[in-house]
Image (cartoon, helix red, strand yellow):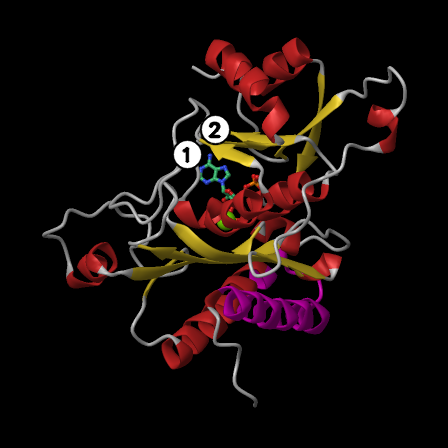
Amino acid sequence: MSSPPMVDAEFARWLAARAGEALVGLRAELGFDDPAALKSAGDKVSHDLIRAELARWRPGDAVLSEEDEGSRRAFSADGDAGAVSRLTADRVWIIDPLDGTREFSEQGRTDWAVHVALWARTAPSAHGLVAGAVGLPAQHRVLATDRPPAYPPLTPDAATAGGVRRLRLAASRSRPPAFLADLAEEVGAELVPMGSAGAKIAAVVTGAVDGYVHAGGQYEWDSAAPVAVATATGLHASRIDGSALKYNEADPRLPDLLVCRKDLASRLLAALHRHGG
Ligand SMILES: Nc1ncnc2c1ncn2[C@@H]1O[C@H](COP(=O)(O)O)[C@@H](OP(=O)(O)O)[C@H]1O
Ligand SMILES: [Mg+2]
C-alpha cells in the first residue's frame, strides 16, 4: 500500500475515507437482518482500522476514541496512565469511528459518519482543533479541513425577492432536546430530524439546513471533527450558552452545541437563552 498523505488534514481525510470504505463493505457483507450485530461490528471494524493506522503513521500522538475502554470517564491529572498521556500530550486525535451507529444499521439511511479530528495544544483557536475530517460514506463524500467546503449559499427560495424561507434546524431523530419544539416555534423554524452529529453538521455546512441545536448529552468525539470542518468553513459553533467549545478536557462530556450560519447565531443564542435553560 502507498503511504498516506503527510499533512495532518489530508491524512484525516484519507483515514475517514478508508474507514468509510470498510463500513460500506461491512453493510454489504452482513446485511440488515441483525441490526445489533451490524452496529457492534461497525464500531469495532472502524475503530480497529483507525487505531492501527494512527499507531502506524502517527505513533507519537495520543488518541481519544469513543470505542476505547474507559473513554467516557472524567480523569484527574493524577489519574491513570492512559488518560494522563492524553492530558499532557501536545497532539490528540479525537475519533468517533461510527457516529450515527443506529442509522448505520438501518437499510437505506445515509445519515451516519466517520469522525477524525486532531487537537493540538498550540492551536490558535479556542476549540484547539487543527484538522478534521467527516466521512459520509453513504453520501459518497468526505468533508475535511484540508479543503474546507465553501460557505453555504442561501437557497434560491430564500434569495428570491422578499421571499423569506422558513429556517430549517437539524435535530436528533431519537433524542432531541425537550425545549426544541418551543424554540423552533418561537423562531419560526422547521425541525429536520436526522441521525449523527456529523451528518447534521455536514447538512449545515452544505446549506441543506440552517443550523443544528443539541443539548442533553454528547461527548467530545461526537462533535470534534464536524466542528473543525464547520469552523474552517466560517460557520458559528459554540455551546448553547454561547461559550467556546473546548476539546481534550479531562471530562470528555460535551453535552450541548449550536452550529449555524454566522448571521443566525445571535438570534438563535437569544432564543436558546430563553428556552435552553
Ligand atoms: N443525550 C445523549 N447522551 C449521550 N450521547 C448522545 C445523546 N444524544 C446524542 N448522543 C450521541 O450523539 C451522536 C448523535 O446522536 P443523534 O443521532 O441522536 O443526533 C450519537 O453518537 P453515536 O452514534 O456515535 O453513539 C449519540 O450517541
Ligand atoms: Mg457519536
Q: Amino acid at mark 2?
A: Ala
Find residue 97 and report its horizontal and vertical position in percent: 50, 61
Q: Which residues are magenta?
A: 9-38
- Does the rendering let one see residue 195? no
**Callout 2 environment at 10 Å: few (<14), some (14 to 19), or many (20+)?**
many
Q: Would you name the residue on which mark 1 appears?
A: 255
User: In the image, is the residue at mark 1 within 8 Å of ligand 1 by its beta carbon?
Assistant: yes
Find residue 230 and report its horizontal and vertical position in percent: 57, 44
| Local secondary structure at mark 1 | loop
Residue extending farthest to the right is 161
Q: Are the residues at dot 2 and dot 1 in contact (C-beta closer than 8 Å)?
A: yes
- Does the rendering let one see residue 227? yes
Residue extending farthest to the bottom is 1
Q: Would you name the residue on which mark 2 appears?
A: 215
Q: Is residue 16 magenta?
A: yes
Residue depicted at x 52% and y 68%: 46
Q: Is residue 263 left or right of residue 8?
A: right
Residue situated in front as seen by the camera: 103 or 53: 53
Residue 57 position (above or below residue 124): below
